[in-house]
């Protein structure tokens, strides 16, 4: 069989897969696909996101001790693989600040998962960006409330890393919480004025956490499989290629 015939058959297979994607219930509403020569560039837009709140009012809370902040959320999936927070730098915080995220079933209970990043290794600038906290996968119960707790170990009210929030209700499946020190109990932040109603966050039910993967269309050693839970085809190798 000639090389050109092989290529034609491969292209036909790819077109068939693409058409099948379009016919599925969810289609490609949350994904984009572009062709660049011999490569297909899959841009999975937040592929794997379960819950999210991305609106903000232009203000953020200071992640400084002794304060702890939390965002409650209600997953729709049974797995949680990581979270990301919309963070930025204010003033001139210490070069090395430990930002910790933990997941709890209740605010006074044990951590179900935890991840700490060091700002000396993860760059956070004055322009906000999504910072991923990737921890070991945990099982969660869909339609049950969980809490995403965040804190920083250094800083003050003029030099700190900050977590964006919105002062309006955009996320109906959770709310913001605060613990002002070790001895005081957790309390829901009351709405009003510039008080945080919901923090900016995303939860993930699988990897990759986003990004772009280039796929060689002439190499069919990586077959697609049907994700029956979400009704679309997924290249098997993507989880191996993107961390």
Image (tube, grey):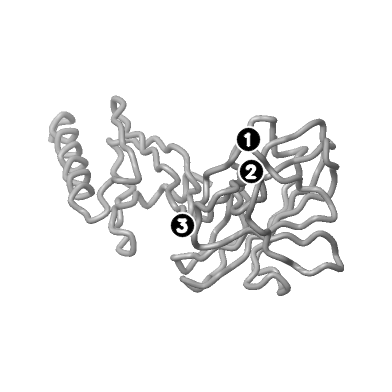
Q: Quadrant of the N terminus?
A: top left
Per the image, label 1 sits on a secondary structure element best described as loop
Instruction: Check contact, mark 2 vs mark 3: CB within 8 A.
Output: no
Along the viewing direction, whichever of 146 and 232 lies nearer the viewer: 146
Along the viewing direction, whichever of 26 and 115 lies nearer the viewer: 26
Circle 1 crowding by C-alpha within 10 Å: few under 14, some 14–19, many from 20? some
In this rendering, would 187 be left or right of 222? right
Instruction: State the image coordinates of residue 206 (x, y, percent, origin top left).
Output: 47, 57
Q: Give the mark nearest the N terminus, 2 or 3.
A: 3
Circle 2 crowding by C-alpha within 10 Å: few under 14, some 14–19, many from 20? many
* Residue to which mark 3 is pinned: 50
Residue ID at (82%, 31%) = 92
Disc 2 to disc 3, C-alpha distance: 19 Å
In this rendering, would 208 be left or right of 110? left
* Residue to which mark 2 is pinned: 164
Per the image, label 3 sits on a secondary structure element best described as strand
Per the image, label 2 sits on a secondary structure element best described as strand
Along the viewing direction, whichever of 210 and 158 lies nearer the viewer: 158
- The circle on residue 235 is none
Instruction: State the image coordinates of residue 43 (x, y, percent, origin top left).
Output: 39, 38
* Residue to which mark 1 is pinned: 128
Residue ID at (68%, 59%) = 189
Instruction: Check contact, mark 2 vs mark 1: CB within 8 A.
Output: yes
Disc number lying in front (2 or 1): 2
Instruction: State the image coordinates of residue 99 (x, y, percent, origin top left).
Output: 74, 49
């Amino acid at each position: 069989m000639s090389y050109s015939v092989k290529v034609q058959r491969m292209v036909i297979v790819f077109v068939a897969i693409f058409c099948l994607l379009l016919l599925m219930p969810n289609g490609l509403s949350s994904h984009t696909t572009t062709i660049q020569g011999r490569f297909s560039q899959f841009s999975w837009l937040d592929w794997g996101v379960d819950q999210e709140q991305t609106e903000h009012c232009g203000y953020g809370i200071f992640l400084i001790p002794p304060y702890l902040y939390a965002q409650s959320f209600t997953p729709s999936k049974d797995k949680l693989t990581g979270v990301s927070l919309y963070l930025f730098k204010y003033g001139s915080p210490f070069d090395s600040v430990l930002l910790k995220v933990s997941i709890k079933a209740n605010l006074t209970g044990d951590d179900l998962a935890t991840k700490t990043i060091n700002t000396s290794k993860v760059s956070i600038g004055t322009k906000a960006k999504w910072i991923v906290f990737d921890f070991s996968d945990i099982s969660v119960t869909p339609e049950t409330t969980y809490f995403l707790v965040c804190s920083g170990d250094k800083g003050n009210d003029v030099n700190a890393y900050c977590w964006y929030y919105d002062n309006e209700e955009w996320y109906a499946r959770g709310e913001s919480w605060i613990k002002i020190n070790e001895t005081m109990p957790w309390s829901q932040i009351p709405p009003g004025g510039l008080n945080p109603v919901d923090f900016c966050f995303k939860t993930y039910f699988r990897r990759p956490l986003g990004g772009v993967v280039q796929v060689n269309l002439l190499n069919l050693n990586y077959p697609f499989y049907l994700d029956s839970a979400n009704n679309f085809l997924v290249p098997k190798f993507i989880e191996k290629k993107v961390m």
